[in-house]
Structure formats: C-alpha cells, structure tokens
Image: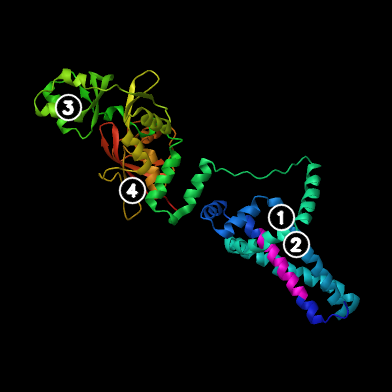
Amino acid sequence: MNDIPLSVLFSALGVLILLSAFFSSSETALMALNRYRLQHLVKQKHRSALRAQKLLERPDRLIGLILLGNNFVNILASSLATVIALRLYGQAGIAIAAGALTLVILIFAEVAPKTLAATYPEKVAFFAVWIILPLLKLLYPFVWLVNLFANIFLRLFGIRIQRPSDTLLSTEELRTVVAEAGARLPFRYHNMLLSILDLESATVEDVMVPRHEIVGINLDDPIESIIEQIKTSPHTRLPVYKKSIDNVIGVLHIRKLLPKIATHELTKERIRESLEDIYFVPENTPLHQLLADFRQKNRRFALVVDEYGDVLGLVTMEDIMQELVGELTVGPARVQQYPDGSFLVDGGISIRDLNRMTGWHLPTKGPKTLNGLIMEHLETIPSPGTSLKLNGFRVEIIEMDGNAVKKVKFFPLQKH
C-alpha cells in the first residue's frame, strides 16, 4: 500500500464517496416514489418503472443490497483515509482522518444526495434501477444470506416479515388525494370528484325536495285545473294524490297524457289508468343505495317517508345527479359574492351545496338547509335585520318569506 501514489489513493477515495452517495440517494429515491404514479407508468410499459416495481416487490432484498454496498464502500473509504493520513501525518493523522472523513461522508455521501433524491425521486430512481437490478442479480447470494440472518434476528422478537400487499386507500385518503390535486384538476371536476366521494355518507334526506315544495296533482281538484297544471308543469313526473300528499296513489308520467289532452279525451279515470306505482324510501336511505335501486328497478322517482309512513319529501334521479355534478340547469344564483367579501345566500339552499360552493364547513349534522340551521341556532323565528354569529360568521337576516328565512348575508371572517 505504501508503494501506491497518493494521487491514486485520493482518486480511489473519491470514487468510493461517489459510490456511497449513489447507494444513499438510490435508497431514498426508490422509497420516496409515488406508488400510484409508478403503477400508472407500469401500465404504460415504462421500462424504468417496470424495473423499479420489480425491486420494490421485495423491499427487504433492495434494502439489503443497498446497505451491503453502502457499508462496504464506507468501510473501504475509512481504510483508505487512514492509510493516507498515516502517510501524511503519522499516528496523529488517524484522528484527523476520522473527523474529516465523517464530515465528508455526512455532507457529500448522505445529506446532499438524499436531499436531491427526495426532491427528484423519479429521476434518481429511474437512473439507479439500471445499476441496482443487475447488481442484485450478481450479489444475490450475499443479499440472501444477509436477509436470512436479519429475519432470524427479528423473529426472536416475534416479528415475521411478509411480502407487502397493495395498500388500498380509504375514502378519506382518496379525498385528501383529490384535495391536494389543486390546480391540476379543473374546478368543476375537482368538485365533482369530491361529490362522488361524499355520496357514501349522504342520505336521501340531504337531497330530497321537502314536503311543502312538492308539486303534485290533487284528484279532488276540477279536471280543468288538473289539465292546466299538466300543460304548464315543468316536471315530467308528478305524484297524484287525494286531499293530502300522504294519500298518494301513484306517479303520473305527463308525456303519456299529452295526446289525450290534445283530443280533449282526458278524464280523471284516464289519469288513474295511466298511473305508475309509487316507490317509497326511508329518510335515512344512503344516497348511493338509492342510486343503485333506481338503476336496478328502472325508476327515476321516489317519495321519502319517516318512521310513521308520513311523506317528508320526494327525490328524483335528477336530484342525485345534481348532487354529483352540480346544477343541471341555469337559474338564479343562490350564492352571490360581493367585492367586500360578503355573500348573499338563499335561505333554502342546502348546507352541503353551500359548503361545496364556498369551501366553508357549516355543520351538516342536523338541519339540512341554511334556513333550518338558523332556526335551530336562534330557537325562534327571526325577523329581517336580525344578526347572529353562526360557526364563526357574522350573519344578518335580509329577507323573510312567511316563517322561512329567504335571504341571508354572510359577512367576511375577521382576521385576528
């Protein structure tokens, strides 16, 4: 060793530090790879991604190889540094070599390469796999032996190593992924994906048309009034009842009667003959379950009932689709924002829709509409001009419609 020139020893030491940096950065990059993007690239037959996936199928072997290589080059670098120090400074150089080499390895073979790999994991990993995979095949007996002793040691503590299975994301984790997508998704599609994820927790009560807003045909009305209602109805299906919506007898598909109206042949008996069976659902039916029922039974309309069988509202396929994709028709804006940051909000809007439009977090447990939430908070019927504090917002009642809140103004949150 004394016959080898110092320049060669320094060059060899530099190569060993580079190898140590390679192993360190490879480990960090491969472990930091986005598994879902990797799966996407694998499906596209990306060659580097295929190699990375093969390595990550057995992380114990990958880590064993990287640590075997890293420790080997670090120990060899320490030996070379000691030889160089002895030749330059004698026995006193050993301490100098230990301190200097520790600093060099820490900066240039650990912190810097691992920071680079964590910042650009895909680039570093896809370069490293072309070296690591052949190296794993070459050194497989040594890696296998290292893993064997390591696994035996872990078993002494009751730990058994199993091959990792594919990790499935929960609904909340998927929600986080969608939320973090940010500007990568158009705003409309971003909200649509969140609505789909919300479908599991939503119930029929969240989207139904409340009882007092149900438009139906009362067979006790004169036939002339019924005909006029059918002609001017914006809906294609209407519930038909006698005296009260609780005495509903069926659903009328208006298009079936239009020819009879034109020929003046429409009677109450013909209306009865044209009725379809009504479909009832409990108020707490999950929305995704109702959607499946609608598709299976080829229905688009249902009445919502409580535990006593009284009608609470109605729900249609359009209501469910609106929950998923937003408003299906263009109408008056239910939420208007002003330059000062305040909002004028329709009191009949559902809290879920309001939260989705504004990004607020008003409580959805309990009342389903803003009007109901305000009534519950005040425990009385307010009058125009009434102000209150609602979930951190200063709110003012702008307009009433009978006993219901029609317009509400939300003032911007105060910054402290």
How far, Cα to Cα, is label 4 from label 2? 62 Å
Q: Position of residue 321 (x, y in %)?
A: 35, 39
Q: Which mark is residue 69?
A: 2
Query: Quick check: is 26 in the magenta stretch?
Result: yes
Tell me, yes or no, if residue 379 can be seen here: no
What amino acid is at disc 2? Gly
Q: Which mark is residue 329?
A: none
Q: Are marks 2 and 3 in contact (CB under 8 Å)?
A: no
Residue that carries the numbered disc 4 in the rendered image = 343
Up-down: is 342 above or below 246? Answer: below
Q: Nearer the viewer, residue 94 or 399?
A: 94
What amino acid is at disc 3? Leu
In the picture, residue 24 is in which quadrant? bottom right
Principal secondary structure, stretch drawn in magenta = helix
What amino acid is at disc 1? Ile
Residue located 65% across and 50% down the image: 57
Residue that carries the numbered disc 3 in the rendered image = 257
**Closer to the camera: disc 1 or disc 4?**
1
- Is residue 100 rendered to the left or right of residue 262? right
**Closer to the camera: disc 3 or disc 4?**
3
Tell me, yes or no, if residue 37 can be seen here: yes
Q: Position of residue 400 (x, y in %)?
A: 27, 36
- Give the mark nearer the N terminus: 4 vs 2: 2
Q: Residue furthest left?
A: 264
Task: Give the SS element for disc 4.
Answer: strand
Q: Position of residue 53 (x, y in %)?
A: 61, 53
